[in-house]
Image: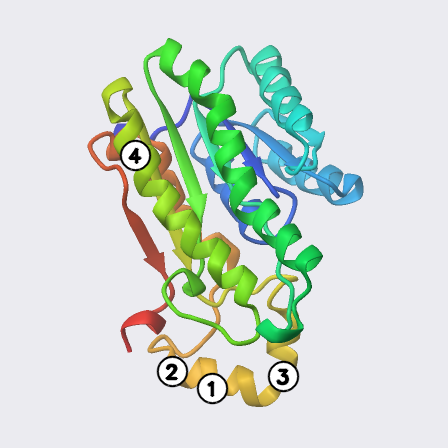
Amino acid sequence: MKLFDLHGRAAIVTGGNGGIGRGLALAFAQAGADVCIAARSKSKLDSTAAEIEALGANCLSIECDVNELEDLKRTLELTKERFGACHILVNNAGIAQQALPQDLTDEQWDRVIDTNLTSVFRFSRTVFPTFRDQGGGKIINIGSEYSLFGSAFVPGYSASKGGVIQLTKSLAVAWADVNIQVNAIIPGWITSEMTGPVKENVEMFQAIVSRTPAGRFGEPEELGGAGIFLASAASDFVTGQSIVVDGGYSVS
């Protein structure tokens, strides 16, 4: 199990105060990592930090807007100051804007692309010198089923998450020679605030569940295994890949 041990490692998880980000942050803590959760809601940051610390792990919570470059730089520097280093970055923060393509405004499009894709590039670029100079690091980007499929109702979200997968491959190729592994997790339909409205739409919820071989939505904690694998020494020769965690939705 030493391959999956994260003791002595420090991770930043954007959007780490809820949903998938919280699930990954808790998994890292259980595997022994020090964890920085970076997000906008202070109340949710405080509650998640308490959960992480209850596991016996060290936690740093930072109010951070991933669309602000200075916030990204500050988050990295505070993480290094608190834990002595940063070894893992999870680009998880994301938003969705529901509208048909013809009704989506430029402002709505830009906000989704900036939050879901541009911030991934910026934070990855920000941690690059640290990872390079210390001899390596792990970047885990969070995609979506809409990285694989088109969507009439969230076209900006779908485009941004498709871009995340291509960016993951590009960064992996660019940085493999300095021992930085860049991979992605593609979650299926996971219980979260973002998917709450979907679960309330009985017709849509039933259609998703009936297509999913596992017959249910997943829980955020169920991404923890993939996250620990990609954050640990077990994946040192794995880069540019996307691990789908969706109960079989994408292959049914």
Dots 3, 4 in contact, CB < 8 A: no
First along the sequence among labels 3 and 4: 4
Q: Mark 4 points at which residue?
A: 172
Q: Which of 31 and 251 is in front in this view?
A: 251
Q: Position of residue 169 (x, y in %)?
A: 30, 42
Q: Mark 3 points at which residue?
A: 201
Q: Which mark identifies residue 207? A: 1
Q: What is the spatial separation of the Cα atoms under label 3 and label 4, in whole angstroms?
A: 38 Å
Q: What is the spatial separation of the Cα atoms under label 4 and label 1, in whole angstroms?
A: 36 Å
User: Of circles 4 and 2, which is in front?
Assistant: 4
Q: Position of residue 134 (x, y in %)?
A: 38, 10
Residue 38 is left or right of residue 244, and the answer is: right
Tell me the element at label 2.
Answer: helix
**Residue under the point 49% across and 19% down:** 86
User: Of circles 4 and 1, which is in front?
Assistant: 4
Q: What is the spatial separation of the Cα atoms under label 4 and label 2, in whole angstroms?
A: 32 Å
Dots 4, 2 in contact, CB < 8 A: no
Mark 4, Cα crowd under 10 Å, few <14 / some 14-19 / many 20+, is many
Dots 1, 2 in contact, CB < 8 A: yes
**Is 241 rendered above or below residue 176?**
below
First along the sequence among labels 2 and 3: 3
Q: What is the spatial separation of the Cα atoms under label 3 and label 1, in whole angstroms?
A: 10 Å
Q: Please tell me in which quadrant of the rendered image residue 236 appears.
A: top left
**Is 175 rendered above or below residue 252?**
above
Q: Which of 5 and 206 is in front in this view?
A: 206
**Residue under the point 46% across and 80% down:** 208
Tell me the element at label 1.
Answer: helix
**Residue under the point 40% across and 18% down:** 131
Q: Position of residue 135 (x, y in %)?
A: 32, 13
Q: Mark 2 points at which residue?
A: 211
